[in-house]
Amino acid sequence: MATVDRQHYALQTIFSFFLGLMVLAFIGVGVNTFYPQPSDTFQKQLQPLYNEQNQINIKGGTPSPADQARLSQIQKQIDDLNAQQQVAQEGWARTTSIVLVLFATLVMGISLIRSEQLRVVSNGLLLGGLFTMIYGAGWTIFSGTSYLRFFVVLFALAVALGLGYVKFVWLRQGAAGAPALAGGAPADVSGLEARVAALEAKTNAAAAALGRDAD
């Protein structure tokens, strides 16, 4: 029986971990689908410039003044596009990290609903929220140097600590208090029975005294 329980617990753990990974994949793919990286757009603009640059270079020999001027112009355009891409990528990373952290907070909040009745699903959602939180916080590394990056990580830490306290301390204290309350009911019932028995004894004694007086 103990072996069956261990196997059942192991399967629950594996399912919870797998569900957490699926939640991470779903949120990550969803965010990148509806809010793609700006590098894709800039690459479409850079690729023709790279191709033209290569066509001039493969001619060999010393470039003509016209080719040299064109190469300088192409390089300037490439540098400008790379600078714009860098700025756009940092802004995308900041926004993506905030969106991911918000989704992670939502999923972790949902995991607290009926967590005792749906423990396996709840643990899976909690793991998925934690994985997404780590993924979102990781994108802040590529968001440049700004105070927003610090506040995103601080918010993620506060949410993790708060929800961890709710799930592992507050909810467990409430679950532990319920049996104690239920266990106190028999004592109350037994006390009531004792009072009823004492009242009956007094009533019988009074009836017996009245009977003696009548004799």
Image (cartoon, rainbow, N blue to C red):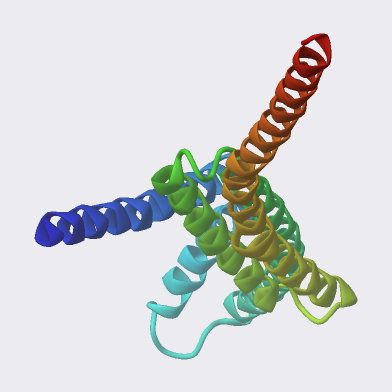
Q: Position of residue 200 (x, y in %)?
A: 70, 24
The answer to whether 97 appears left or right of 34 in the picture is: right
For residue 122, say whether it is visible.
yes
Residue at the image position 61 percent from the left and 51 percent from the top: 180
Q: Which quadrant of the rendered structure holds the C terminus?
A: top right
Q: Which one is in front, 149 or 93?
A: 149
Residue 54 lies in quadrant: bottom left
Residue at the image position 61 percent from the left and 63 percent from the top: 133
The answer to whether 46 appears left or right of 60 in the picture is: right
Q: Which one is in front, 134 or 145?
A: 134
Q: Which one is in front, 175 or 135?
A: 175
Q: Position of residue 90 (x, y in %)?
A: 73, 68
Q: Specify the farthest residue to the front.
A: 215
Q: Specify the farthest residue to the right.
A: 147
Q: Position of residue 31 (x, y in %)?
A: 59, 46
For residue 112, say whether it is visible.
no
Residue at the image position 36 percent from the left and 58 percent from the top: 17
Q: Position of residue 13 (x, y in %)?
A: 31, 58
The answer to whether 215 appears left or right of 172 in the picture is: right
Q: Specify the farthest residue to the bottom.
A: 62
Residue 124 versus residue 204 in the image, above or below: below
Residue 136 versus residue 104 in the image, above or below: below
Q: Which quadrant of the rendered structure holds the N terminus?
A: bottom left
Q: Specify the farthest residue to the top.
A: 214
Q: Which one is in front, 35 or 157?
A: 157
